[in-house]
Image (tube, grey):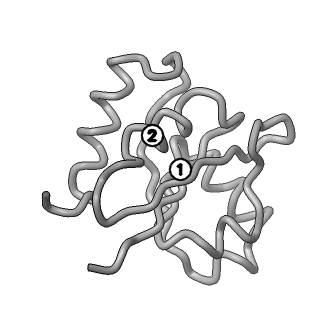
Amino acid sequence: MVSQNFLFVCGKNKLRSPTAEYIFANVAGINTLSAGVNRDAQERVSDELVEWADIIFVMERQHRTKLQKAHSAALKGARIVVLVIPDDYAFMDQRLVTLLKTKMSRWLPVQ
C-alpha cells in the first residue's frame, strides 16, 4: 500500500492543524504534517511542505487563498480541501477531534 501525505493547514499552527496532525498520525496509509499560513505560525507553510503533500487540508477558505498566493508555483494543481472548521477550539478539544474525524472520514483509508 502506498502512503499518502496529508498536510493540515490553519493560521498559526497552534490549535486546529496540530490537532489534525496528531489524531491522524497513526492512521495506516497516511503521513501527516501541519503548518500555518500566518507569519507568526509555529511552523510556517513552505514550498517544500506543499510539494511533499498529496492533499492539503485547510481549515478555512482564507487559508486556501493565502496558500495559493504565497505558494502558487509549488502548488502546481495540488488538491486543496477546505474543511470549514472555525478557530473556536483548543488543541485536542474533544469537539474539534470529533469534527475533524467526521469531516476527514471520506479521505481516510478504509481500515
Give the x, y percent position of residue 93: 42, 17
> Which residue appears at 54% of the width and 76% of the height?
78
Depth check: 22 or 84 in front?
Answer: 22
> Which residue appears at 51% of the width and 18% of the height?
88
Query: Is 20 located above or below residue 26 in the figure?
Result: above
Give the x, y percent position of residue 60: 54, 42
Q: Which mark is residue 20?
A: 2
Confirm or deny contact between disc 2 and disc 1 (CB under 8 A). yes
Find residue 94 and report its image quarter: top left
The amino acid sitting under disc 1 is Phe
The amino acid sitting under disc 2 is Ala
The residue carrying mark 1 is 8
Q: How many marks?
A: 2
Farthest residue in the left direction? Answer: 111
* Mark 2 / mark 1, whichever is N-terminal: 1
Q: Mark 2 and mark 1: span between their CA atoms?
A: 7 Å
